Amino acid sequence: MPGILLAIGWFALLLWLMRRMRLVREAQGLSLPVLGWLFALKAMAGTAVWAVYTYAYPDRATADIFKYFDDSRVLHEALWTRPGDYLRMLFGIGNDTPWFTDSYYSRMNHWVRRWDSGLHNDAHTMIRFNAALRLLSFGHYHVHTVFAAAFSTVGSVALYRAFARPAAGLNRGLLMAVFLWPSLLFWSSGVLKECLLMAGLGYLLFAAIGTWNAEARWRRLLVIACSIALLLVVKVYVLLCLLPPLVAHAWCRWRPGRAGLKFGAVLLVLMACALGLGSFFPKADLLYLLAMKQSDFVGLTREVPTGSMIQLPVLEPRVASFISNAPHALASAFLSPFAVLRQGPLVWLGALESALLVVVPLLALWKRRAWRDMDAPATLFALSFIVLLALLIGWTVPVVGALVRYRVPLLPFVGWLALLIVDPARLPSRLRQFLS
């Protein structure tokens, strides 16, 4: 009961603070009462995540929401015995020594990954995040849920602001596209990496492609830098998929015209640079890292069996292997839940969402506006990010449950793309009024 009361208190305080944020107050089509309901919905979704991992899948040692929370207790306790060690572990400064391994990391279960391809260990980020929140939660888990929901809500508002200008006049449709995809609402509201991912993604795009005052240039650059830093320690692959579209979009805004040619050129040049980098720095060989990532996933599923595993073509660190497997990867990213429908109701929900991912853009194409009336840079931005992230996920993730979770940042872009394509004048009047 004390934990629930403390969580309610923090919910009220965080809502009060959000309502006073300029980011929220200037969001067209997003009233303060609606913000309150959305924050409450996310808090309830985060509680649902807790309930699923408490009652449906009660193995606390393998549940992401608990394993990092439990490990954070070890880090937090160092504050009262050796504050210097606490700060060094919290900020990652000189903490990779035998002393820290013997005194702290050996008592954690997830600081060191069994299957490690050499990429950044984002488990460290979540352990540190939970350790910092323990200063405010006093170890009560539901307070962490409230803060996770707050991070996700603010990030989603920033994403809504970033998407708003190209989708002007369809505010309610944009609200649903950004907030109400079932997987996005569920996974981004729990004490998981997705809550921080939405914060970093939303603020990065709001600062990079949103509408800012000219005099706020340095503040804008600071937001971009902080957002990039957050994505680097949470989901670096999302940042890598965002980089080419962001560069191409900036080029199109700087020199309008021939958006398709510019996006194609940027994608080809940056991909060639990424592939060439491996020749000089073997540890940065993108194809090798992706092939190893797939191997890590397969190894993990052998160690912890799952009923939703699907067979993936084995990737080899060659361009031809990735190109030949691209159609399978796209199909896997969008349609894989249909392959494991016998696994239960959660898979059926994933399949329903997969159907929406395909049907909604197709319906928008059916009622599309003329190309000259589209915002070409925004449309190509959304499309290129969707394809890049879908390929990356489809190439490497052999577990449908994990795949549905990893494609969460892709979902609002699919909804945004549909709104950019559709011609509101060609929609039935009731649907047009509903989306406006």
Image: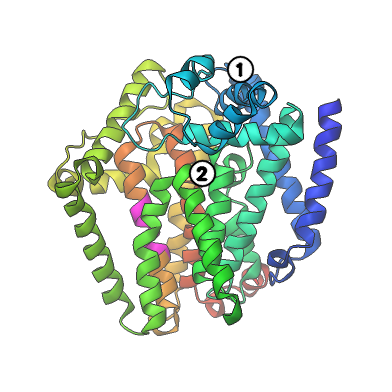
Instruction: Find residue 37 and report its horizontal and vertical position in percent.
Output: 77, 52
Instruction: Give the magenta-colored segment's residue range.
Output: 382-389
* Disc sitting over residue 287 in the figure: none
Q: Quadrant of residue 129?
A: top right
* Secondary structure of the residue carrying numbered label 1: loop
Q: Amino acid at mark 1?
A: Pro
Which of pointers 2 and 1 lies earlier in the amino acid sequence? 1
Q: Residue at x 40, y 18 (%)?
A: 305
**What is the distance, in whole Å, between disc 2 and disc 1 at their CAs?**
26 Å
Look at label 2 and name its amino acid: Leu
The question of residue 153 being in magenta is answered with no
| 409 shown above or below 68 | below
Question: Which residue in the protein does label 1 denote?
Answer: 58
Badge nearest the viewer, 2 or 1: 1
Give 348 or 8, whichever is nearer the viewer.
8
Dominant secondary structure, magenta: helix
Which residue has dot 2 on it? Answer: 352
* Disc 2, SS: helix
